[in-house]
Amino acid sequence: MDCDNLETFLNAYGGGGSGRFTERVESGKENPYSCAVLAGMRSMQQRRASLEAFKEGDVRFLICTDVAARGIDVKGLPYIINMTLPDEPENYIHRIGRVGRAEKMGLAISIVAGQDYREKVWYHTCSNRGVGCTRRQLKDQGGCTVWHEEWKMLSAIEARLRTDVLELTTEFELPQSLLDTNVVYGEEGPEENGESSSLSIGLGQTNARIEQWQSSVKELVAMEYEAQNLFLSMTTQFMK
């Protein structure tokens, strides 16, 4: 429902009325906020058409639920904007992983409510999955809303990432540390000593994870080897 509402808003704001994207327009993008939706409540055919329209550049925005957080690859995708943060930090990682792929630079922006602020959001428990629903009472009061405390979600994400997420300035500009990198999002990163910075950062993170998991992987390999030997010995014993 949030996807539907955002789709309606962007179409209307861009002067295209409330109509959904249906097909390519030969004269180009007639709406500066042209968009399509990729969500579970749309049919498989609609989802495929929306993704294809976005890949081909027929629409500027693809509005998604976490259905699109995994397994979808759009080459050179420069930006992703989290309208709301996910409940699980792992889903945040999957979401932002849609950008910055194949050595291309990407920027993930999250719109987060400030500390100590709560947002009442839809959490539909009704049979019609929110269509025409006006039950604004909380879920535990028989309604279809819950409280979100996004600053707590952000803290959990930062703990998972083991680093702080940079904040935009009060004028909604990028922090200076990002402005100084001479990056074009959607393109390859700037060269540093013959290697792109995005590649070197990725390799550094990978090497750190390999070192962290190495002992556990060796233990799992030994356990798997022992389990296979036990299975083979049991098979031989019962076959006799």
Image (tube, helix red, strand yellow):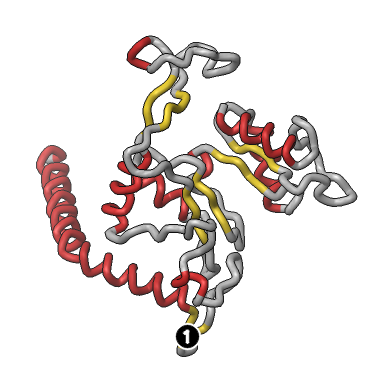
Displayed quadrant of residue 138: top left
Alpha-carbon neighbours of circle 1 within 10 Å: few (<14), some, or many (≥20)?
few
Give the left or right position of residue 55, taking residue 123 as reference. right
For label 1, the residue is: 192
The residue lying toward the viewer, choosing from 50 and 109, is 109
| Residue 183, above or below 83 | below
Q: Provide residue 83's location: percent of width, then percent of height.
A: 51, 42
Disc 1 secondary structure class: strand
Q: Residue furthest front?
A: 170
Query: Which quadrant does the C terminus fall into?
Result: top left
Residue 233 x, y percent position in the rendering: 12, 48
In the rendered view, would you say 52 is above or below 47? below
Amino acid type assigned to the residue bearing label 1 in the image: Glu
**Relative to the observer, which residue lies in front, 84 or 234?**
84
Foreground residue among 221 and 76: 76
Is residue 51 left or right of 228 when viewed as pictured? Answer: right
The image quadrant of residue 120 is: top left
Residue at x 63%, y 45% (from the top left corner): 62
Please state which of residues 144 and 192 is positioned toward the viewer in this rendering. 144
| Residue at (48% x, 60% y) in the render | 169
Residue at far bottom of view: 193
Name the residue: 39% across, 44% down.
Answer: 114
Provide residue 133's location: percent of width, then percent of height. 55, 14
**Residue 100, position in %: x, y?**
51, 63
How many numbered marks does the figure carry? 1
Residue at 35 percent of width and 36 percent of height: 149
Quadrant of the image containing the N terminus: top right
